């Protein structure tokens, strides 16, 4: 945004400059992103900003906004810039190093909620591998009371601390247990549902380990839900069936080239 230092500290002028910079950087929705960032900075709805183009901004606000736009142009995520992530109606605070949920996280949650409601159980235990900022576990706890205990597992103690603060704010930490670790070995009991929302590519060591552990950590009648790269669908589903003998495996295609795969185990293991 060099050469535009004389842009007045007015909402309309600042938005126009930001939109140009974001468009020049090749971002797909420059107007929406410019509005979102300014709305977060001024704690004002985007509709009100559009309606008040002559609203004044302090010099500090204008300078901060310019910095934020520069960070976005450089590729930093919106949530890391503002410190907040909007996810399924939840306002989730995130740190600069907090891993954000993948693009199809909402579809993973919706698949898990549908599975839970069709399970026939009134009390379900779940575990999420790679919980990151906690968005998926928070949504499961907020929207489905059948989940009476959720183990949110991540290797980052910093990310878990921030996620736990979100859980406390939403009064969900009676359900969610935030656990530092890399895999299912950190929980001591089998669960009904295991979620891995990171795109799985067959035969990676992490995915192979997850499948090995799932065979003992998923209770009869339980399920493993994972996000799968579309190109690896056949290979991943074959490995799911191999790891959970007799499991019913089905996939739900997503618009971004991934699949949400569900491996539903037998309710009664074969004798």
Image: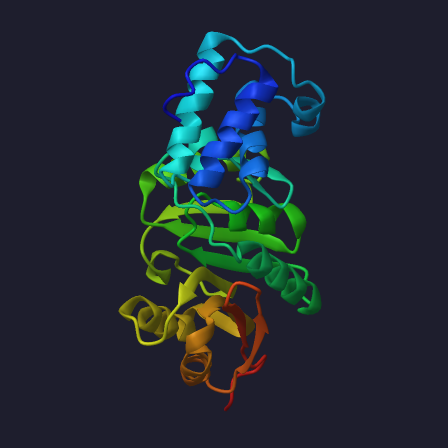
- Residue 142 percent coordinates (x, y): 63, 45
Image quarter of residue 146: bottom right
> Residue at point 46% right, 65% down?
190
The number of numbered discs placed on residues in the rendered structure image is 0
> Residue at point 47% right, 58% down?
127
Q: Residue furthest left?
A: 205
Location of the N terminus (image quadrant)? top left
Which sits in the foreground, 62 or 88?
A: 62
The reply, left or right, for residue 94 in relation to residue 47 is left
Taking 160 as reference, is 222 above or below it?
A: below
- Residue 106 percent coordinates (x, y): 58, 54
Which sits in the foreground, 31 or 214?
A: 31
**Residue 114 visible in the snapshot:** yes
Taking 244 as reference, is 22 above or below it?
A: above
Image quarter of residue 220: bottom right
- Residue 38 percent coordinates (x, y): 55, 25
Which sits in the foreground, 80 or 89?
A: 80
Q: Residue furthest bottom?
A: 271
> Residue at point 70% right, 63% down?
117
Which sits in the foreground, 108 or 15?
A: 15
The reply, left or right, for residue 111 in relation to residue 17 is right
**Residue 95 visible in the snapshot:** no
> Residue at point 56% right, 25% down?
15
Q: How is the image coloured?
A: rainbow
- Residue 230 percent coordinates (x, y): 47, 73
């Amino acid at each position: 945004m060099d050469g535009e230092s004389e842009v007045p500290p007015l909402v309309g002028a600042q938005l126009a400059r930001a939109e140009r910079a974001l468009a020049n950087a090749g971002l797909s929705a420059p107007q929406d992103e410019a509005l979102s960032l300014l709305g977060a900075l001024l704690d004002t709805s985007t509709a009100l900003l559009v309606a008040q183009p002559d609203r004044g901004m302090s010099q500090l606000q204008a300078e901060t906004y310019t910095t934020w736009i520069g960070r976005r142009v450089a590729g930093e995520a919106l949530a890391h810039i503002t410190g907040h992530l909007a996810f399924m109606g939840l306002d989730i605070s995130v740190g600069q190093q907090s891993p954000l949920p993948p693009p199809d996280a909402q579809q993973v949650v919706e698949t898990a909620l549908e599975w839970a409601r069709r399970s026939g159980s009134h009390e379900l235990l779940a575990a999420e591998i790679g919980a990151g900022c906690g968005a998926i576990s928070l949504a499961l706890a907020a929207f489905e009371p059948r989940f009476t205990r959720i183990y949110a597992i991540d290797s980052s103690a910093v990310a878990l601390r921030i996620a736990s603060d979100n859980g406390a704010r939403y009064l969900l930490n009676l359900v969610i247990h935030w656990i530092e670790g890399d895999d299912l070995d950190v929980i001591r009991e089998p669960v009904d549902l295991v979620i891995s929302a990171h795109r799985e590519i067959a035969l990676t060591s992490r995915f192979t380990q997850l499948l090995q552990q799932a065979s003992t950590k998923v209770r009869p009648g339980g399920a493993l839900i994972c996000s799968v790269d579309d190109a690896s669908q056949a290979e991943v589903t074959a490995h799911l069936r191999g790891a959970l003998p007799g499991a019913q495996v089905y996939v739900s295609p997503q618009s971004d080239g991934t699949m949400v795969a569900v491996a539903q185990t037998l309710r009664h293991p074969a004798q």
